[in-house]
Image (tube, rainbow, N blue to C red):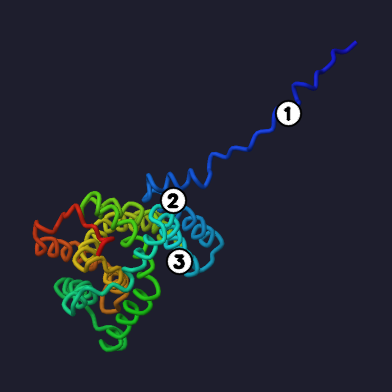
Amino acid sequence: MGSRVSLQAYARGPTTPARFPLTLEAMTGFAQRHPIVAFAVGAIAPTWAVQLLFLARGWPLFPAFLLELVFLVGSAVVVTARTEGRPGVRNLFAGVLRWRFGLGRLAFVLLAMPASTLLIAAVSGSLRNPDGGWGKEIAGYLFLTLIFGAVLGNVWEETAWAGFAQRRLMDRHGLLVGSVLTAIPFALIHLPMALEGGPGARDLAISWAALILTAPVLRYLLGTVMIDTGGSVLAVAILHASFNSTQQLGALHGQWQIFVALPLLTLLVAVTRGSTTADTRQLDLSAR
């Protein structure tokens, strides 16, 4: 006679509410303790997923770049709402229209990058007459920087990077360390871009090395503008767009000149700003 199997071992015990480790309260608590990490994960993970999908399918990456802006701003808004509420969200977007700089500062963020890069090209003998003449070159640069770049793209990108992440990191660690820390997720989110076109291992390594080495320098320069303009995300966005547009200038033979001009320009800014403002620890940009 076979042994009887007791069903009591399979009987359900007293009904208890299901416990999920990832609750809204837990996520809010994590965001409050680690806002930068929460923002970075919320922005980088979906950006990588979408861009790698587009690359695998052979689709143009431009729609994926637009989604990157959505993920960046969306992550910044969600974390800000959870940590600072509606006033924090309003302050996050306040920098988009903050114009606390004169014509001299506007000339710097708009013209310093192409001017220094073209100067390097002229000195090195890698400057050439652009196709269509200089008038077309200047008009194209201004369109890419002010309209296509700053207004449509970089102002939203920098709302997340400068207005959310770098502001917090500079408030806590100062300009230099805060900028370097911001450069880490900033570089990470841009890594898949180098895969476009199926580059070889050598070209990919060069692209990633240039990105990783350039990111801290660029974030430092953008951080100085953020401080010196009283937290103007718009000014930061124009300079960021100028950096991108300068690389597209037809007057340059090659694209290496900007990677020489950027550190030289940043060093010049750091020296001229002086030690009194170069590493202010209490920026309190949210109050400006």
Q: Secondary structure at mark 2?
A: helix
Q: Is residue 133 above or below residue 87?
A: below
Q: Residues within 10 Å of mark 2 (few under 14, many from 20)?
A: some
Q: Residue at x 40, y 52 (%)?
A: 83
> Label 3 belongs to which residue?
65
Marks 3 and 2 sit apart, C-alpha to C-alpha, by 17 Å
Q: Hey, what amino acid is under mark 3? A: Phe
Marks 2 and 1 sit apart, C-alpha to C-alpha, by 38 Å
Q: Which mark is residue 232?
A: none
Q: Quadrant of residue 271?
A: bottom left
Marks 3 and 1 sit apart, C-alpha to C-alpha, by 50 Å
Disc with the residue nearer the chain's start (3 vs 1): 1
For the residue pair 208 and 91, the one nearer the viewer reads as 91
Q: Residue at x 30, y 79 (%)?
A: 250
Q: Nearer the viewer, mark 3 or mark 2?
A: 2
Q: Are marks 3 and 1 in contact (CB under 8 Å)?
A: no
Q: Hey, what amino acid is under mark 2? A: Val
Residue that protrudes farthest toward the right in the picture:
1
Q: Which mark is residue 41?
A: 2
Q: Is residue 47 left or right of residue 88?
A: right
Q: Is residue 277 above or below residue 131?
A: above
How many labels were placed on the picture? 3
For the residue pair 283 and 136, the one nearer the viewer reads as 283
Quadrant the N terminus occupies = top right
Q: Hey, what amino acid is under mark 1? A: Arg
Q: Is residue 153 above or below residue 10?
A: below
Q: Residue at x 36, y 67 (%)?
A: 93
Percent from the top left, x then y, of residue 263? 19, 61
> Label 1 belongs to which residue?
12
For the residue pair 189 and 86, the one nearer the viewer reads as 86
